[in-house]
Amino acid sequence: MKLLAADYDGTLRYLDEVTKEDIDAIGKWRKAGNLFVIDTGRSMESILAETLKYNIPVDYFITNNGGMVFDHKQNELFASYLDPVMSLDIMYLAKEIGNVVSYVANDGYHRHRVIIDDSLVEKRYPGLKPDLSEEELMKSGKYAQFVISMSEMKEASLLADKINEHFSHTVVAYANKYVVDIVPKGISKAIGLDYLCRYIHVPIENVYTIGDADNDIPLMEFGMHGACMKNALENIQEHATFIYENIAEMIGNNL
């Protein structure tokens, strides 16, 4: 039995939608007795909506950049959370640094958006409406991930570097196009995948991975079959062993 762990945004959903070609390929992969896993920076709430929208067959979900792991019935298998005091500092930072459109706090399953500057264009969460006040969010005390949405990709990359420089003792930040994903120290897409592989007893030599962005580098470097999307930046592709046009091509080469 093989396991394919794929990033979602920019990888499985590398066009404006998930293609029928990729969905059919995933069906063939699973029909051959293999497992398909989505390994994403999104929350469980968010990625579940996407899989239902496109009717994507998924065996396991790794969410929050590896901080949470769920089975196909959404049963929680693994969870990690940020320090509550550090989380309040992140909320304060998001309001003070400038050029921040909004931030999203993730409680491990659900996500809650706070708008910082509505004069800036929201690239990541244009349709996500705030459901809690910032005061209510601060009182909740449970935070698995923060996503700070910037107006420019370059600014997201610079902010991730700054957070990693000053707060590396407690968190790790990943630049993901227009946003910065912030998770507990030691968490990555590879950590979540490693937990899952040990949980279901899949040997590392049977694991295939694919991604397209900075936060996918640990995923692409996991095991011996790490791949990158052809549409990714050249410096990201350097971390992969294989380059594919899409998931269908990857599956076709490995069935």
Image (tube, helix red, strand yellow):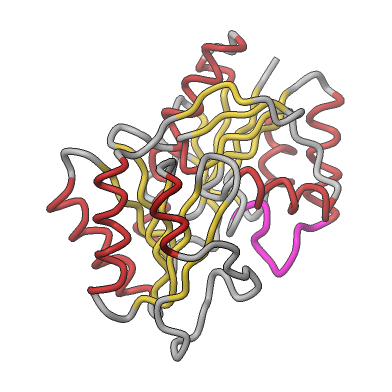
Looking at the rendering, the stretch of residues picked out in magenta corresponds to 11-19
- Res. 84 image quadrant: top left
Q: Which residue occupies 86% across, 47% down?
A: 55
Q: Which residue occupies 59% across, 57% down?
A: 9
Question: Measured from the top left, where is residue 41 in percent x and y?
Answer: 51, 48
188 or 252: which is nearer to us? 188
Question: Measured from the top left, where is residue 154 in percent x and y?
Answer: 32, 74
Question: Measured from the top left, where is residue 219 in percent x and y?
Answer: 46, 37
Q: Which residue occupies 40% across, 77% down?
A: 116
Establish if 139 lies above or below 69: below
Asked if the stretch drawn in magenta spans residue 203, the answer is no
The reply, left or right, for residue 46 in relation to residue 195 is: right
Establish if 193 lies above or below 154: above
- Res. 56 image quadrant: top right
Question: Measured from the top left, where is residue 155 in percent x and y?
Answer: 30, 74
Q: Which residue occupies 22% across, 39% down?
A: 170
